[in-house]
Image: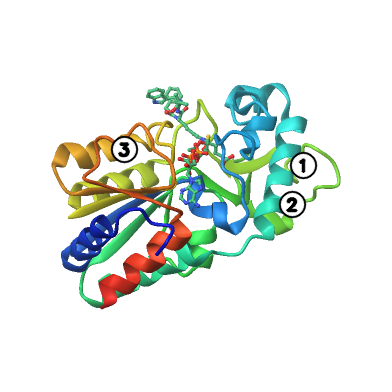
Amino acid sequence: MSDLADQTELQLVAELLQTAPRVAVLTGAGMSAESGIETFRQPQTGLWARYDPMELAHADALARDPKMVTEWYHWRFSRCAHAKPNPGHVALAQLQQLKRDAGGNVDVLTQNIDGLHQAGGALDVVELHGSILRWRCQKTGEKRPIGEVDFSSFPPTSKAGGVLRPDIVLFGEMLPTDAIEAAERAVMSCDVFLTIGTSAVVYPAAGYIDMALSRGVPTVEINPEATPMTGSVTHALRGPSGVVLPELLRRVRD
Ligand code: BJW
């Protein structure tokens, strides 16, 4: 594997994954980068190099300018709609199946709103920041699939006359309680914790890495770049998840 710096670390992580019954995985935008979806914070290529994230992904912005924010999320959906799961998504789903067949599990906790883990075959994915594939009426709370939303004008509205917004978590909004509970259960019961493709700066999601560290379980970061957590994790695998995860799966199966 020419993309990977350290074969020894890779083998150690594969052995950890082989023996650990329960694995918890936190994923971020980097997981979908090889599916062609822009990450948030990378210079030049990240969406937010061109747009101000606090302007667009903040609850206050939605309240102030629902037209702009819903238009932007409609554009983001068009990027996600054409995206396919990459080899990283598929390898993670296959690792989950392998663990389930052996009586264990891989809990997938994602910050991504693109649905690509599920499209790649992962089950029971915990969507910490919601899903762009569902939109929600601000007036009634009713949720509907994006295919049923009329985007002929912005912001889209429901039959009840409320603004329809993506069913996602913006800055300043609470994460869904059931997602928080499921994530905490997964992190508190895992034997190995993986953080993949996240800059680990947005909370509370980044706090799950701290939670795993404080439990003393082995922690693994998969990312082509260093993050604030790199110095704290047990193993840092430098490389794109679409390359590293299939290679790990191959070694776990060997
Ligand atoms: C690759 C790769 C490849 C590239 N392979 N890797 C504690 C401390 C400080 C602040 C706070 C705190 N607790 C709460 C806050 C406030 C705030 C927050 O965290 N602010 C920080 C920015 C400072 N958090 C919140 O507001 C949260 N709500 C909350 O706490 O509620 C409580 C409350 C509410 C009200 C009153 C009082 C209390 C909500 C956070 C919601 C985040 N929402 C967004 C938008 C979602 C919709 C959308 O997707 O548009 O979620 S923001 C954005 O960041 C998005 C992402 O999910 C999230 C994380 O980004 P991610 O995934 O890490 O992406 P990047 O781009 O940052 O990183 C990509 C990485 O991939 C890089 O490392 C690359 O190197 C790597 N990579 N190619 C593998 N091929």
Give x and y (percent) for residue 175.
44, 37
Give x and y (percent) for residue 227.
38, 35
Residue that carries the numbered disc 1 in the rendered image: 156
Give the distance between the C-alpha atoms of the residues marked 3 and 2, in whole angstroms: 41 Å
Residue that carries the numbered disc 2 in the rendered image: 149
**Label 3 secondary element:** loop
**Label 2 secondary element:** loop
Amino acid type indicated by mark 3: Thr
Q: Residue at x 25, y 64 (%)?
A: 14
Q: Is residue 123 visible?
A: no
Nearer mark to the viewer, of 3 and 2: 3
Q: Nearer the viewer, residue 7 or 157?
A: 7
The numbered dot on residue 10 is none
Q: Disc 2 vs disc 1: Cβ atoms closer than 8 Å?
A: yes
Task: From this view, report whether residue 51 is shown above or below residue 217.
Answer: above
Give x and y (percent) for residue 249.
33, 70
